[in-house]
Structure formats: C-alpha cells, structure tokens
Amino acid sequence: MKVAVDPDPSLIYRPDVDPEMAKDKGSFRNYTSGPLLDRVFNTYKLMHTYQTVGFVRKKHAQFGGFSCKKMTIMEAVDMLDHLVDESDPDVDFPNSFHAFQTAEGIRKAHPDKASPSPSHPRLSPADWFHLVGLLHDLGKVLSLWGEPQWAVVGDTFPVGCRPQASVVFCDSTFQDNPDFRDPRYSTEFGMYQPHCGLENVLMSWGHDEYMYQMMRFNKFSLPEEAFAMIRFHSFYPWHTGGDYRQLCSQQDLDMLPWVQEFNKFDLYTKCPDLPDVGKLRPYYQALVDKYCPGVLNW
C-alpha cells in the first residue's frame, strides 16, 4: 500500500478565510472600542496632523534614491519580526507573521487561478498573487530605520485635498493639520483636477507608497495589478469606503477589483494562530527568485 506524502510541507499552514468559519468580519477594524484603541487613535492623530503636501514631498525626496540599505526580500521579511503596527486595532504580534498569513490566505483561495492578467495575457496570476501577500507590508522597514510609525503605517489618503468622510477618525484628528486650513488644499478637489487619475495624486506617505516606488526602482517583474495592490492596499477610504472616486481614471476603476480582492486576505487572515514560517519559506523564496531576486536597493 502506498502512503500518501504531501510533496509541499508548507501546506501544513493554510488559514481558512471562509467568513462562516473565520473570525466575525464585523469585529475587524473596530475604531470605537478595544484594548488597543488609545494606541491606534494617537497614531492616527499624529498622522493626520503632520501628513501634509510639504511633508510628503520631503519624504519622496529623502527616500526616493533608495540608498538606505541593500538587502534581499527575505532579509526585509525578517526585519519585520521586530515590528508591531501601532495603527492596527486587530493584532499585537510582529508584522512578519501577518505577511505569511496574508500570502497563505491568497494561496489557499487562489491556488491555480486560470484567468489571465489583463496586462500580462500570458501570465497566470496565481503565484505572483501569493508573492504580493508576502511583499505588501515590507515598506514598514522604514519604522525600523527611525521613521515614526505615523509616517509609515495606517490607512492612507490623498494629501492636497479635503479628507473625505470614510477616513479613520476624520472628524477628530485633522484640526491641527495646516493644509486643512489652506484654501489651496481644503476643497473637494484641492490641487487636483476631476478624474486626473491616482497616478497623479500625492498620497499620504507610508509603507504603501515607499514599497511601490521601491519595486519600480528595482524593476520587479510583476504585472500592473500587483503594483496597484501594493500601492493602494491601505487606501481604505477608496477601496472600501467608496470615497475619492472623483479623482479616479478608468484605469484606477479597472484596478479596483484587484485591490479589493487582495484586501480580503490582508484583513481577514489576521488571527493569533501564527504560521510555521520555517516550513513556508522555501515556497516563497522560489517566488522571490522568480520575480524579484537578489540583493535590492531599499
């Protein structure tokens, strides 16, 4: 009798994101109560006070040369062993585990998705989609290089125009932001034109924008859908709140379903059942070697 052997030992960890079996969706992103609320509110208060047009432009200039460090993707993942996200009301464990939870949630739901990527017709999105789960928060290494968490983590939003209603703590945290009182930046469109496209919008500075720019700089061989997921996965007011559509181009609207699909795994795989990272690493190392190998500029 033949004994069945699982050829992939990493399959020992596959978080179940079925809404009927997972944590109640309504209990995620609770910004009204909970043991972490004070920490979360203080992070957003600082963010919404100091994230201005001038500040964001300064950070683009500071980090846009990608001369902070040279390291591999897996070295960056390991760095997140030392980071707990102070903006997250759902978890209080190192971000590296969340990276593998997200990736494995995608891998379970999309093991061999057959529909082609619109921007890469010959490429199945299956394996690169798994990799995006691992990559999406690596920009948070900024906080380990001395950047305050309010300039790294949390939901993103466009600067240079009035914050819209679905921005977290919108009514109680922007009063001290100088752009909030500047007539150039305090209207619905602010410094933008209708449907100018999100590629022309200056987003609040953080790990999303940094990682997106870093991937462009290092020429990751990923489809445009992957870049959109990385750049906008924390833009909850857009992909979940339904705001800022007046700034979107048709291309943005075409990318929105991909960002929303990614968001399900970024959010709903968070749980205290931590993965066995050692068993997962070989699978993801192979994806790194395929799409973004070697020592990279950060």
Image (cartoon, rainbow, N blue to C red):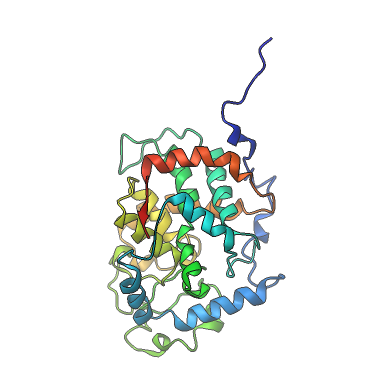
Q: Is residue 47 visible?
A: yes
Q: Where is 285 relative to 238, above or below? A: above
Q: How many marks?
A: 0
Q: Position of residue 211 (x, y in %)?
A: 40, 60
What quarter of the picture does the C terminus occupy? Answer: bottom left
Name the one closer to the observer, 130 or 169: 130
Instruction: Locate residue 262 relative to residue 60 in the image: left or right.
Output: right
In percent of the image, x 42 and y 51: which residue is there?
A: 72
In percent of the image, x 30 and y 78: which residue is there?
A: 191
In percent of the image, x 35 and y 52: which residue is there?
A: 254
In percent of the image, x 38 and y 76: which residue is there?
A: 159
Name the one closer to the observer, 277 or 215: 277
Q: Position of residue 226 (x, y in %)?
A: 39, 49
Q: Position of residue 212 (x, y in %)?
A: 37, 59
For residue 21, which quarter of the picture?
top right
Q: Position of residue 158 (x, y in %)?
A: 39, 72
Name the one closer to the observer, 175 or 193: 175
Instruction: Locate residue 198 relative to residue 114 in the image: left or right.
Output: left
